[in-house]
Image (cartoon, rainbow, N blue to C red):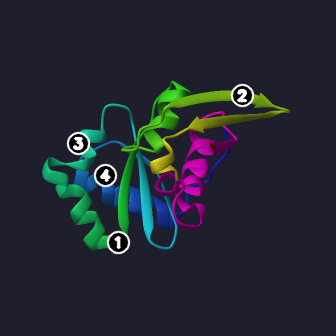
Amino acid sequence: MAERVISNEDMQKIRLATSITKADVIDCVEDDDTIVFVVSRGFLGVAIGKNARNIERLKEIFKKNVRFVELDDDEERFVANLFKPFKIEEIRIEKVGNRNVARLKVPPKDKTRIIGKGGKNVRLARMIAQRHSSIDDIQIQ
C-alpha cells in the first residue's frame, strides 16, 4: 500500500460526503469530471442512498460525476468492486518482478467502457488500488 497524506481539500470532500451519506467514507480520488469515494465494507448501499439520492446531491455540489467503491479485505473482490457495475469474468493477481499486477478478463462488448475515455477508469481504479491494497497495476485483457 502506498503511503498517503490526505490534503485538506480532500478531507473537506470526505467530510461532506460522510455528512450527506452517513456512510464511513475513507478516501476520495478525482479527475477533471469524476470523483470516486471509497467507503468501508458494508456501507455501499448507505452511501448511494435510496434511489441514488446521495449520488445526485453530491453531483450537484461537486459539479462532477460521483461514484462509490466499497473497500474489501479480499483483493480480488476489491478489484471487482472498483469496476462495478461491469461484469469481470476473471481476476488474476500475479507477481511480476516485485509488483503485484491484477489482470482482468472482461467481456469484449464492455472492454472500452471499462477502460474509459483515455484510460480514465483504469487510471482511477489503479490509484485507489495502490492506496488500499498491495496491487501496483491493473491490466484489462
Mark with earlier residue (3, 1)? 3
Determine the CA span between mark 1 and mark 2: 37 Å
Region in magenta: 112-139
> What amino acid does circle 4 point to?
Thr
Determine the CA span between mark 1 and mark 4: 14 Å
Instruction: Assess disc 3: are there few (<14), some (14-19) or many (≥20) residues with their C-alpha within 10 Å of its C-alpha.
Output: some
Which SS class for mark 1?
Answer: helix
Determine the CA span between mark 3 and mark 1: 19 Å
Disc 2 designates what residue? Answer: 94
Determine the CA span between mark 3 and mark 4: 10 Å
> What amino acid does circle 3 point to?
Val
Dot label at residue 54: none
Disc 4 designates what residue? Answer: 18
Disc 3 designates what residue? Answer: 46
Which SS class for mark 2?
Answer: strand
Do the CB atoms of the residues marked 1 and 2 lie less than 8 Å apart? Answer: no
User: Which of label 1 and label 2 is nearer to you?
Assistant: 2
Determine the CA span between mark 3 and mark 2: 33 Å
Residue shown at the point (57%, 53%) measured from the top left? 122
> What amino acid does circle 2 point to?
Glu
User: Which of label 3 and label 2 is nearer to you?
Assistant: 2
Residue shown at the point (49%, 34%) measured from the top left? 78
Work out which residue is located at the far left of the displayed protein and give it.
50
Q: Quadrant of the N terminus?
A: top right
Q: Is 119 one of the magenta-colored residues?
A: yes
Mark with earlier residue (3, 2)? 3
Q: Quadrant of residue 81?
A: top left
Disc 1 designates what residue? Answer: 62
Quick one: 139 or 133, which is closer to the camera?
A: 139
Instruction: Assess disc 4: are there few (<14), some (14-19) or many (≥20) residues with their C-alpha within 10 Å of its C-alpha.
Output: some
